[in-house]
Structures are given as structure tokens and as C-alpha cells.
Image (cartoon, rainbow, N blue to C red):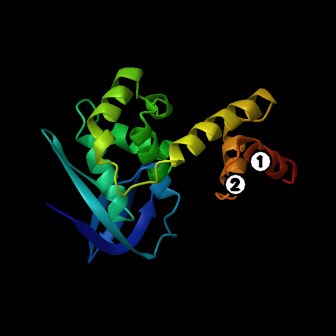
């Protein structure tokens, strides 16, 4: 089992990277959320890995922290959730938000991931609810839920969803009141 890989980031592609480890190029799949955080090609890089062995081959999934890898492993431990689905769940929100949603029993927040239906989201919540200690504080699900409402409100005002998410991502995390977060996101949108 490969636990970590350390080498030079050779190239980034859609959904995976090539990591050069002493002349051997490893294809390492990464969620988009990880891909966005990676340095430019030619930079040194260390991945915490998850190896998925299938009938027709082996795939490596790479993460920048052990916490990300542990959450990914927990998600894939749920029946019906494979590595690709787990990666899409991690693209929807931060690990803390995903953990908070699971801990609070907010399955509807997980259905925002492509390919995750209501039944799968509920199964994830039921199977992982008691395993979220150390991933997030319990109040983060409330903030995440209000953020979903804020994005929907901004979309209703005519902003694109991605534009609204980007503006909301810039809001100080210390602002937790729904109205204050909405005002701050609107301010970010109008100051572009």
C-alpha cells in the first residue's frame, strides 16, 4: 500500500496530476478542491495517498493532508460510495463543512455533490455520524446550511451560482449571522 508520495509536480490535468518520483511518473487522481490548491508544475509536492485496487487496474488518489485522506477513506467505506463519488463530495465544501453536515444529520447538504442522491446521502450520514470527531466543530453545519441559503438568495437576485459561492468564500468566517454573511457577500459582488 502506498501511503505517501513525494516528488516533483510534472503536470496538472483535469482530475489528476503526474507526480515525478525519481524519474517515475505516477498518475494521481485528486478532487478539484485539492487540484486548485496545488503549486505550479515543477514544484516539489507530497501527497497522502489512497490506493484503490479494482479488477482492471489500480488508482492512486492524492491529498495534501492526512485529514483529507482520512475523510476520503471514511466516505469510501460507505456502501455505494466509490472514490469518484467521494471526491465529488469533497469538492462541494470544505472537510469541516462536510463533517459538520454529517454530524448534524444534514443529508441534503451532501446531495449537492454530483452523483449523490438522497438515499446515498442518508446512508453516509447514518454510517458516519458518530465518526466525525476531530474533523469539525458541531456548529459548522448551521453556517454551511445558511451559506446554501445565501447562494440560493443571490442566484435569485440574478447572480451566477459560482459567482455567489466565490463571493461567499471571501466572507470572514467569524461572521456567522445569516444576514451579515449575506450583506458581506453582496458587498464582495458589488466591489468586483
Residue at 37% x, 65% y: name it: 65
Q: Which residue is mark 1?
A: 180
Give yes or no for contact between labels 1 and 2 (Cβ–Cβ under 8 Å).
yes
Q: Quadrant of residue 155?
A: top right
Of 76 and 142, nearer the camera is 142
Of 146 and 39, nearer the camera is 146
Q: Which residue is mark 2?
A: 175
Sort mark 1 into few (<14), some (14-19) or many (20+) by Cα contacts within 10 Å.
few
Report whether 167 appears left or right of 115.
right
Q: CA distance from mark 1 to mark 2?
A: 7 Å
Residue 153 is situated, as x and y percent measured from the top left of the image, at 74, 31
Residue at 38% x, 44% y: name it: 87
Residue 113 is situated, as x and y percent measured from the top left of the image, at 47, 34
Report whether 177 appears left or right of 183.
left
Q: Secondary structure at mark 2?
A: loop
**Res 6 label:** none
Of 98 and 100, nearer the camera is 100
Residue 148 is situated, as x and y percent measured from the top left of the image, at 62, 36
Q: Secondary structure at mark 1?
A: helix
Residue 165 is situated, as x and y percent measured from the top left of the image, at 66, 44
Sort mark 2 into few (<14), some (14-19) or many (20+) by Cα contacts within 10 Å.
few
Q: Quadrant of the N terminus?
A: bottom left
Q: Quadrant of residue 105?
A: top left
Residue at 66% x, 33% y: name it: 149
Report whether 89 appears left or right of 129.
right
Residue at 49% x, 51% y: name it: 94
Amino acid at each position: 500500500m502506498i501511503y505517501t508520495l513525494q516528488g516533483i509536480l510534472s503536470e496538472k490535468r483535469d482530475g489528476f496530476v503526474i507526480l515525478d518520483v525519481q524519474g517515475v511518473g505516477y498518475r494521481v487522481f485528486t478532487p478539484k478542491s485539492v487540484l486548485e490548491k496545488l503549486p505550479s508544475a515543477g514544484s516539489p509536492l507530497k501527497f497522502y495517498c489512497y490506493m484503490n485496487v479494482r479488477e482492471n487496474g489500480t488508482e492512486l488518489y492524492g491529498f495534501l493532508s492526512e485529514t483529507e485522506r482520512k475523510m476520503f477513506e471514511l466516505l469510501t467505506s460507505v456502501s455505494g460510495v466509490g472514490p469518484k463519488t467521494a471526491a465529488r463530495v469533497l469538492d462541494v465544501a470544505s472537510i469541516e463543512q462536510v463533517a459538520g453536515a454529517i454530524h448534524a444529520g444534514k443529508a441534503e447538504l451532501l446531495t449537492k455533490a454530483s452523483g449523490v442522491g438522497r438515499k446515498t446521502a442518508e446512508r453516509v450520514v447514518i454510517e458516519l455520524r458518530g465518526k466525525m470527531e476531530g474533523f469539525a466543530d458541531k456548529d459548522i453545519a448551521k453556517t454551511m446550511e445558511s451559506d446554501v441559503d445565501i447562494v440560493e438568495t443571490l442566484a435569485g437576485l440574478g447572480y451566477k451560482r459560482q459567482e455567489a459561492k466565490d463571493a461567499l468564500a471571501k466572507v470572514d468566517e467569524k461572521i456567522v449571522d445569516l444576514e451579515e454573511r449575506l450583506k458581506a457577500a453582496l458587498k464582495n459582488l458589488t466591489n468586483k
